[in-house]
Image (cartoon, rainbow, N blue to C red):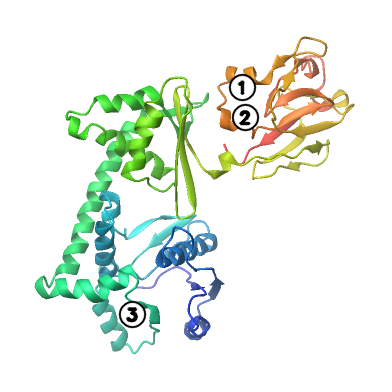
Amino acid sequence: ETFKASFAAVYIDHGLSPNAKKWGMHCQHICYELDIPLTIIEVDGRTKKDQGPEASARIARYKAFAQLLEKDETLLTAQHLDDQAETLLLQLLRGSGVKGLSAMPKIKSFAQGFLCRPVLDYKKQDILNYARQHQLHWIEDESNDEQCFDRNYLRHSVLPLLEEHWPAVRENFAKSAEVLAESQSLLDQMAGSDCYDLYVRDNQGNVEYNKLLLQPTLKLLKQEPSDNHKSARLNNVLRYWIRINHFPTPSKKILQQIISNVLQARQDAMPLVSWQREDVYCAVRRYRDKLYLLDSASSARDRNNYLLNEYEPVELGHNQGIIQCIPANKTCFKQKELFSKTLTIRFRKGGERYRRAIGEPSHSLKYWFQEHSIPPWKRENIPLIFWGDELIQVGNSIVCEQLNTDQSSNPLQDSVVILWQKENN
């Protein structure tokens, strides 16, 4: 049948082989004959700290794929049944759980689109037979024979021995991976059901997926029928919660630290457990009655001061968003009075105070944050708007009410709102 779709090819040059440029030329030749557009991307696939050579190359490769893929596009890769067997065995040797032992799915969400593996059910030999029958030309990466790499060692030294005694070992490993994937799907359904009552919701009822309510989460510990599996259900929820927020799944040891050091910490504590995998930082924190899932951006600080005028938006550092003055459609400032003094954007250093009206007693910004349940790690990243030396706005909240427009008597066209558009919540 004819596919009603357009195709394009991409070749990733990892910068690891002296033959990489020749391989790119081979791809160009094949794509030219097939009239398929080709993109060649060079990445740094060299071994990084705390990563093996295979992992470093894979991470660099998939980052490039993710940046290239546009909305609703599908990336097709050629992993086959033998690759699936190797993946399951590798994960087993690493002590992975059900999710890891599920190995590679045939299709999954990826970046803005999807990742599909259309030949995952076919053995490598079947694909080679097809290629020879149709006189296709391909290139063998010389590193595939180097048994210093874990996958290559399994491929050349371990699986052939297993196959001598169990001829269907590759197919059976792939079947096991499929069964485990079904089990993982059931675990995810259970976790999703558990999480429904744990998620924090904002004032409009929208779910904030990176937050969980503390007490309902702790109750899961009391629902286990056996002390031997006391935290099994909670572990499942935590893994699911972390994964749907696109963070790396923590180890069993880290999960136990989250439960004992964060969930069960004393009431007035603000504990933190963090981990990092494949260049992705993740942390779980607690403040009052909520759990928070955070990335590295939450710890980035902008120490600069910025001038704000009525014409141009200001872009804040560390992806903290932009601030601009726009015509008012809600609680707002009197435009003429607002710009009678210099407006500056600053960030918290400690000791800031504000007045609800000029001349009134001042109040501590620290107490304002506490009253509004702002977690301490967020406070230093919330922009403060100063009118001269007076703090008049915190984030998008006006704290100096004297400058507010009385909308019943003052035309809105003479008023403005100072709007902070956040990139990270």
Per the image, label 1 sits on a secondary structure element best described as helix
Residue type of the residue flagged with mark 2: Arg
Q: Farthest bottom residue?
A: 135
| Quadrant occupied by the C terminus | top right
Q: Residue furthest top?
A: 360
The percent coordinates of residue 369 (x first, y second) are 61, 22
Q: Is residue 70 left or right of residue 418?
A: left
> Which image quarter: residue 365?
top right
Where residue 236 appears, as percent x and y from the top left, is 30, 39
Q: 263 and 13: which one is in front?
A: 263
Q: Is residue 164 left or right of residue 217?
A: left
Q: Which residue is denoted by mark 3 in the rendering?
A: 145
Q: Are marks 2 and 1 in contact (CB under 8 Å)?
A: yes
Label 2 with label 3: CB-CB less than 8 Å: no
Q: Quadrant of the N terminus?
A: bottom left
**Among the two numbered marks 2 and 1 on one chain, the one whose residue lies closer to the N terminus:** 1
Residue reaching furthest to the right: 340
- Using the image, determine if residue 413 lies above or below residue 243: above
Residue 147, numbered circle:
none
Give the alpha-carbon distance from disc 3 to disc 1, as whole Å: 60 Å
Q: Secondary structure at mark 3?
A: helix
Q: Position of residue 419 (x, y in %)?
A: 71, 33
Q: Which residue is mark 2?
A: 379
Q: Secondary structure at mark 2?
A: helix
Q: Residue at x 67, y 28 (%)?
A: 396
Q: Which residue is mark 1?
A: 369
Crowd band around label 3 with a 10 angstrom C-alpha radius: few (<14), some (14–19), many (20+): few
The three-letter code of the residue at mark 1 reads Phe
Which one is in front, 216 or 283? Answer: 283
